[in-house]
Amino acid sequence: MKFKLIVASMGALGLISCPAFATQTKHHHHHHKAKHVAHRDYKDMGPIPAPVEVCTISTSSLIMDKTTQNEGRALPNPCNPGWFNRIALSGGVNVDLGKWGNRNANYMGENYKRISLNDVYLNLSATVNDWSKAFVSIDYATPTTNPNPAIFNNRGAAEYDAAYANNIGGSGANLIQVEQAYATFGNFDVSPIYVQVGKQFADFSRYDIHPVTVSLTQAISEVLATQLKVGFIANGFHGSLYGFDDPTAKIGSSSTPTNYGVSLGYDQICDNFGWGIGAAYLYNLIGVNDTAYSVNNFTGGNGYHSRVGGYAVYGDLNYGPFTLGATFTAAAQRFNVNDLTKNGYADLVPISLTSALIGSGFQVTPGANATGAKPWAAGIQAGYNFNVWCKDQNVYLGYQASREAAGLNLPRGRWEAGYGIAMWKNTDFGLVWDHDQAYSRSNGGNSKTTNLVSIRAGVKFA
């Protein structure tokens, strides 16, 4: 019955001709053309139209799809011409190099490799029909991952971004991965409602993926997970409700719990004067990839004890050549003291004097006076775009701050300045300077001021 339904549906789509299918066994990579019969009148029936061209798919090809478990999947099909009009391919390469300054500051979001592929990506989008679209992004990256924990008391080794390396447990590697893959169902000519399902970045705050340096707010906001999302876009207003499984399990459970988030915003997009604002809530901040990574460091990879909600607000403005943006993300409650302490590793005591001297690290149990962290991070950045020597260029300056986030391997404050130039078509170069101020020793840092200078060379095609 299943085979008959498939044949019937293919006939309805014009993929096969029932008489030809019953009598011919041509391979599906060939077209079968029917003879054109001369037009003629027959009594009062008028002219008889010439038969249309018929494309057949052989019985052996259909059976082969069954034997290889590919029945029902999208396969190359000569009876479906024009596929290239519905599929678009783009991509790019971003190389980060230089890294002059302190390459041992141990901050989440900073890449300390002299030369690395921040990301090599291929994006594939497909317009299936008026109501269905698909997007896939395949990525490879080699920034800082799994640094040597011995230099950080065997705990708390930070890395560039746990989401891109799928490294929540601290044992991942930089591999080719499907970074995003989701389908969108909706038709904005008919309804403002849409549904998305698949792996994507959640609508929680605003940030650039694969930046030279991950901002402090992005480090506690970025959620990359397989989601089910229902949203709307109407007259600049937009909102969504989405759910996904957390990247790590709760202690005492073998399965990861389901998380959810909600967002609402408004965007007025215009080159001369545009602006946007938005707010979002996340039921459990353990869904943020870098937060899950840091909590796993605290608990020794055992997961987390208690849920903590979080919220984010953002706004951006562009007026002529000027841009201004601000972000803020915070925990709504305090973390369980056994998941994340207010002062990070300063709240943990050595197991013993002997083990501390040989670098065996810290015990998981916090000190008697320790409390759970309630971290937040904020950032503001202003930019100016200009054209000199027939080259589009921009400069920007920003300041970022965090509190109670030493356990998340974030600095207390950061000045960031950058310059970018579009040297040739689809070829960009950038220079970024990060000036970081650590937390004091009593608050989980080392009280040091560090600097890092990076260069990015990027090309893209579309």
Image: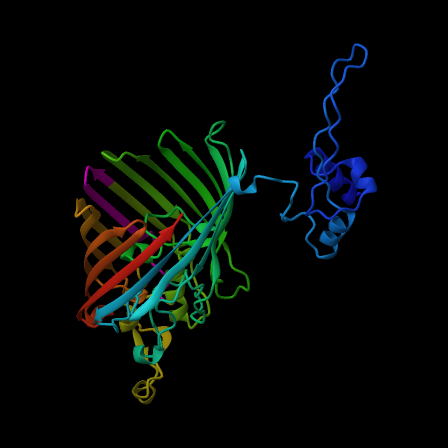
Task: Give left or right: position of 181 versus 427.
Answer: right
Q: Is residue 251 above or below residue 462?
A: below
Q: Quadrant of the N terminus?
A: top right
Q: Is residue 417 above or below residue 447?
A: above
Q: Residue at x 25, y 51 (%)?
A: 422
Q: Quadrant of residue 13?
A: top right
Q: Residue at x 34, y 38 (%)?
A: 265
Task: Give left or right: position of 242 versus 377.
Answer: right
Q: Is residue 322 magenta?
A: yes
Helix, strand or loop for the magenta stretch, by majority: strand
Residue 105 on image: x %, y %: 25, 71
Q: Quadrant of residue 35?
A: top right
Whether residue 86 is visible to the viewer of this picture, yes or no, is: no
Residue 317 on image: x %, y %: 23, 39
Whether residue 8 is visible to the viewer of this picture, yes or no, is: yes
Q: Nearer the viewer, residue 1 or 65?
A: 65
Residue 110 on image: x %, y %: 29, 65
Q: Nearer the viewer, residue 224 or 274?
A: 274
Q: Is residue 152 magenta?
A: no
Residue 218 on image: x %, y %: 32, 55
Q: Residue at x 36, y 64 (%)?
A: 117
- Residue situated furthest bottom in the rendering: 354
Query: Which portion, as a residue range, is magenta?
Result: 317-337
Task: Give left or right: position of 27 versus 266.
Answer: right
